């Protein structure tokens, strides 16, 4: 306990030093965007320095990676784009919502009235259109998905990347999730622990969009479990009621 307090104090001192450094950075009107980029790089570099100096030794000594099943942070995770995860029951409009944001179709897109998206899909910016297998994503040195291999081959076979050139994806990474089903049979047939995977992504997401269909507001057992997995991230959650324009005020 005493060691933890010392580590925290050191981290606070480093943070205070960093705050003083950033406060002295000049800003100019003509180079505002460049200064913003420089400040972002400075923040990322200092956060990495604070983590390596003050947090990582504590995690390593107390086996944080073992007890919390979470590997140590890498530079890629500090530098990764903000992540937005979409969650909802099947046929609620998650994939259509992403398609609207991008203004186009994307590789691996599946849209239909029945459960069509049966996998976690990460949408990333890239020079060419292609799909990337989940096992390749989980070990890619430039992507922050290291650690997903712990969920097994069954999950990795239902995890893929969708790469395409997009102005939206230059600044953010979108995560489309499988349509949430009802009934024990469907849950078991997934072959992996859906709620634990949702919790893994929720820990790393900057925004979580929880979509509901105005005509289907019932909450299945699996959806309830997924919502429970989001506890502690309430500040990230935004609820979207799809097809709300198709019902009257009384409904």
Image: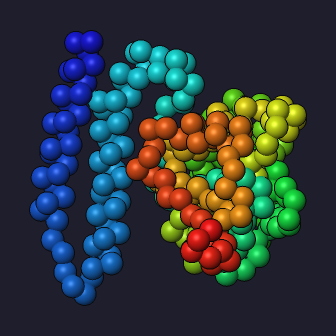
Residue closest to the eye, 216 or 46: 216
* Residue 134 to residue 170: above or below: above
Q: Which residue occupies the extreme top position in the image?
A: 1
Whether residue 82 appears in this view of the structure is yes
Q: Residue at x 35, y 36 (%)?
A: 51
Residue 205 is situated, as x and y percent measured from the top left of the image, at 52, 50
Q: Residue at x 28, y 63 (%)?
A: 39
* Quadrant of the rendering where the C terminus is positioned: bottom right
Residue 99 is situated, as x and y percent measured from the top left of the image, at 70, 74
* Residue 133 to residue 100: above or below: above
Whether residue 98 appears in this view of the structure is no
Total tally of numbered discs in the picture: 0
Q: Which residue occupies the extreme bottom position in the image?
A: 30
Q: Which residue occupies the extreme front position in the image?
A: 250
Q: Give the image quarter of residue 14.
A: top left
Q: Give the image quarter of residue 147.
A: top right
Residue closest to the eye, 63 or 119: 119
Position of 105 with respect to 103 (left or right) is: right
Position of 16 with respect to 50 (left or right) is: left
The colour scheme used to paint the residues is: rainbow
* Residue 246 to residue 135: above or below: below
Residue 26 is situated, as x and y percent measured from the top left of the image, at 15, 71
Position of 67 with respect to 224 (left or right) is: left
Residue 97 is situated, as x and y percent measured from the top left of the image, at 66, 70
* Quadrant of the rendering where the N terminus is positioned: top left
* Residue 198 to residue 93: above or below: above
Q: Residue at x 83, y 43 (%)?
A: 157
């Amino acid at each position: 306990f005493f060691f933890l307090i010392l580590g925290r104090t050191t981290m606070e001192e480093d943070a205070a030093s960093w705050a003083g450094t950033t406060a002295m950075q000049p800003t100019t009107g003509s180079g505002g965007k460049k200064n913003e980029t420089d400040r972002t790089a400075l923040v990322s570099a200092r956060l990495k320095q604070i983590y390596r100096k003050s947090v990582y030794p504590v995690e390593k000594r107390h086996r944080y990676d073992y007890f919390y099943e979470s590997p140590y942070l890498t530079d890629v995770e500090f530098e990764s784009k903000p992540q937005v995860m979409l969650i909802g029951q099947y046929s609620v409009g998650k994939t259509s919502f992403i398609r609207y944001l991008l203004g186009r179709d994307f590789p691996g897109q599946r849209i239909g009235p029945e459960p069509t998206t049966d996998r976690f899909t990460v949408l990333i910016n890239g020079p060419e259109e292609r799909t990337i297998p989940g096992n390749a994503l989980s070990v890619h040195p430039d992507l922050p998905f290291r650690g997903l291999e712990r969920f097994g081959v069954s999950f990795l076979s239902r995890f893929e990347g969708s790469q395409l050139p997009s102005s939206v994806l230059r600044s953010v990474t979108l995560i489309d999730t499988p349509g949430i089903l009802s009934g024990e049979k469907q849950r078991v047939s997934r072959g992996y622990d859906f709620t634990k995977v949702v919790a893994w992504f929720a820990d790393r997401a900057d925004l979580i969009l929880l979509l509901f269909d105005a005509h289907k507001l019932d909450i299945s057992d699996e959806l309830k479990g997924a919502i429970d997995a989001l506890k502690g991230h309430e500040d990230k959650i935004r609820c979207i009621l799809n097809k709300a324009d198709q019902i009257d005020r009384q409904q």
